[in-house]
Image: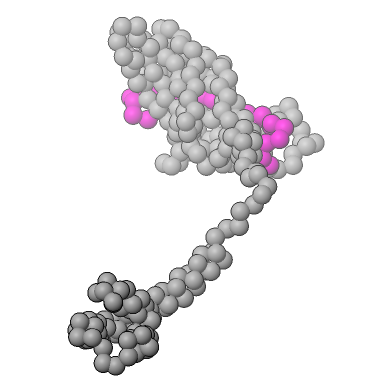
Amino acid sequence: MTSNQTLCPLKSTQEYGIRSFLFFVSRNFGPPPPPHLSLSLVKFTREWTAISPIVRLARSTSRTSREILGGACKERGRERPRMSSSPTTRPSSGTSLMESLLGLLRIRVRRGINLAVRDVRTSDPYIVIKMGKQKLKTRVIKKDINPEWNEDLTLSVSDPDVPIKLAVYDHDTFTKDDIMGDAEFGINAFIDALRMDLQGLPSGTIISRVQPCRKNCLSEESCILWSEGRIVQDMCLRLKNVECGEVEIQLQWIDLPGAKVL
Ligand SMILES: [Ca+2]
């Protein structure tokens, strides 16, 4: 027997433990074992004695880890949403826009009163209206601080709590346009009136009134009224951040088929 043949069973017995190895030696070689095998056996026994607690711990840890991991996998399996064979029904952007849209707000910009002078003796005013990301403009009326626009600007309304901002500018050809004041207003009272059933009321009936206060930019009482089969709100806004100027507007509502119920 060569030393290589002797070492082969040593390697295999490492997998089954010291008892299997001793059985193998006694079965094939009988006592007493050759000196070189005795040395290998002593060396192996020492090594096995040293590593066996680690092996037991490793086997125990491995089993425990498998059990823990198995449990976690089951937990994850329960928590993980089941894959559906049916396609997802995500609404398109157009559909979601219509679902959130309440209707259209038409702002009739009637006129400006005693607007600020930004040129030599007069101004070339126009109005910018913003609601959220929407921005609309009137035309420029040249050399007039009491301009009459009578122009309709229409906004789409999804959230009636979003305030509407109005600003007046003086148009200049060669320099940056000058600001001529601004104002802000809400439409909650107007929306509340739209929710009422007012059919059959005589035209001109006042539904509600909004008083001027520090929180709004009204320069006088604003009336919401039933006029010719529809609800309108007249507003006179006192411009801020400027020496003078007012702007008269009227709110109207346009229902859209398929829009969200008010
Ligand atoms: Ca100008």
The mark tally for this picture is 0
Given residues 168 and 225, the one toward you in this image is: 168
Residue positioned 74% across, 39% down in the render: 198
Q: Is residue 159 left or right of residue 237?
A: right
Of the 4 image quadrants, the one containing the C terminus is top right
The residue at the far front in this view is 1
Given residues 258 and 103, the one toward you in this image is: 258
Residue positioned 33% across, 17% down in the render: 178
Quarter residue 53 falls in? bottom left
The residue at the far bottom in this view is 31
Q: Is residue 255 left or right of residue 108?
A: right
Indicate whether residue 46 is drawn in magenta.
no
* Residue 191 visible in image: no
Q: Could you tell me residue 195's position as x and y percent?
A: 68, 42
Secondary structure mainly formed by the magenta segment: loop
Give the residues drawn in magenta, as a range.
Answer: 240-262
Q: Could you tell me residue 20's position as x and y percent?
A: 38, 86
